[in-house]
Image (cartoon, grey):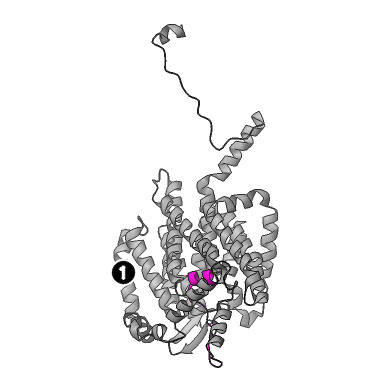
Amino acid sequence: MALLAIILVFTNVWRFHDAFSQYTGSIPAAKVMLVASGLMLLMSKPDKFFPEVFGSKVGKYLGLYLIAAVISVPFSYLRGGAIERLIDLLIGSIPFVLITAAAARNDETLSRILKATVIGTIVAALIMAVGLGLVSNGADGPRTSLRGMYDPNDIGAVAAACAAFAIWLIKDKSRIWQLVGYAGLAASGYIVIRTYSRGAALATGTLVLAATFLTKDAVPRWVRSAIIPAVLLAFVFAPAKYRDRISTLGTVEADYNLTANTGRIEIWKRGLGYIASRPLTGVGLGQYDQAEGRWGSEQGISRGWKWSAAHNMYLEYTAETGLLGGVGLFGMLIATLAMCFKRMRATARTPADEERRRMAMAVFLATLTFCVAAIFVSAAQSPMLLFLVSLGIGLSLREYGAPVRRAAERIMRNRTGARIPKRLPVQPTRPLSPNWAQDVR
């Protein structure tokens, strides 16, 4: 289970099998992993595991997220495309969520999964550094992504979120893993710079501030005092075009995203209109671009109109699946953040408790960072979103103590044949009589 979860991180989150497609051809790694995931789930007693997953607070919101996707299909603008996206979501992504959630219930396995994400960040940075990345030269500069990634903004968001796991790793007991953590942190910054993504830069800034001021002992004290100067130093030595692009955040009034009809602000305004027109069913799973195309046709724009993506995860999924989908998406992220925040604030009585607290802190920082990056990317069905949700589910199952409860139920059933009630009855006590000592004699 642990090995499969780690492989799924490399194939689903980072999609390394696509990064080398120019040399290896089209390797159906995702399909192979899909079959392996299905077999693993069948062998893991799904009749017991599934109720636990979707019975947790994060899992309940994931259920709403999926139900809304199903409801939207019959009412979608392009039904065939919506069905294809739904099949990909249910068959291609949900097994990944369930496998990762099952593995994340165990402290040692969760630690290995988080370490794998850091190694993935380093590998992705090396791919870019040796020239195997996909470079698109445009007005914004030479923006780099990995093959198989839709957009440089997408991989920038993934790298920014994975930096949280690198921060967690630099306080590992092993000196080697500490060095891997520092390398992962540097690799994350390198990827963000190479993508020229302003959204990823803002997300990285959020991570730096949260790790410095919000979390307890996230990094060593000397790192905490040096992290902000290090970020400023990295910005100074970044390529000139990158500095120019980031500096536009201070002159947003001249940005095309605020003025052009195809800019983000106008796209988001139209997205609010799509929600208002179809609040219950949405325009259909994966159909935001279809809605944009229809709007252009209604305005009489026949040539040169861009059927744009939403460039905002929250608006994207709410417009595509209705308010129910929006509640599911927001809910599973907020539930993950709240649960992790509660756990990382808990008192650690043993070294094992302290390590659990630190892993919850890492998931909290990664989720918060991705939530900020997702304001600027269409990531409502992205592997990184579902990966973070699966970690939240795994931590939720651990918090509710389902394995301990099952063991207690088995013991009670073997002895008495009865199940343990959720709340044991409390027997009322009678006050002792004044002559209790004589009664005892």
The residue at 55%/55% (across/down) is: 60
Q: Main secondary structure of the magenta part?
A: loop
Amino acid residing under circle 1: Ile
Residue 431 vs 343, above or below: the answer is: above
> In the image, is 156 to the left or to the right of 220?
right
In the current view of this chain or complex, which residue is farthest to the bottom?
Answer: 303
The magenta stretch is 301-319
| Residue 223 against residue 138 in the figure, above or below | above
Residue at 53% in and 30% down: 425
Whether 97 is among the magenta residues is no
Judging by the rendered image, the residue that carries numbered circle 1 is 228
Q: What's the residue at 40%, 47% (across, down)?
A: 346
Q: Residue at x 62, y 56 (%)?
A: 1
Q: Is residue 84 above or below residue 304?
A: above
Where residue 142 appears, as percent x and y from the top left, is 45, 86
Question: Callout 1: few (<14), some (14-19), or many (20+) C-alpha neighbours within 10 Å?
Answer: some
Which secondary structure lies at badge 1? Answer: helix
Rendered location of residue 73, percent (x, y): 64, 70
**Residue 166 visible, this orientation:** yes
- Residue 304 located within the stretch drawn in magenta: yes
Q: Is residue 437 above or below residue 92?
A: above
Q: Is residue 123 visible?
A: no
**Mark count:** 1
Q: Is residue 419 left or right of residue 208?
A: right
- Residue 210 percent coordinates (x, y): 36, 63
Residue 112 is situated, as x and y percent measured from the top left of the image, at: 53, 58
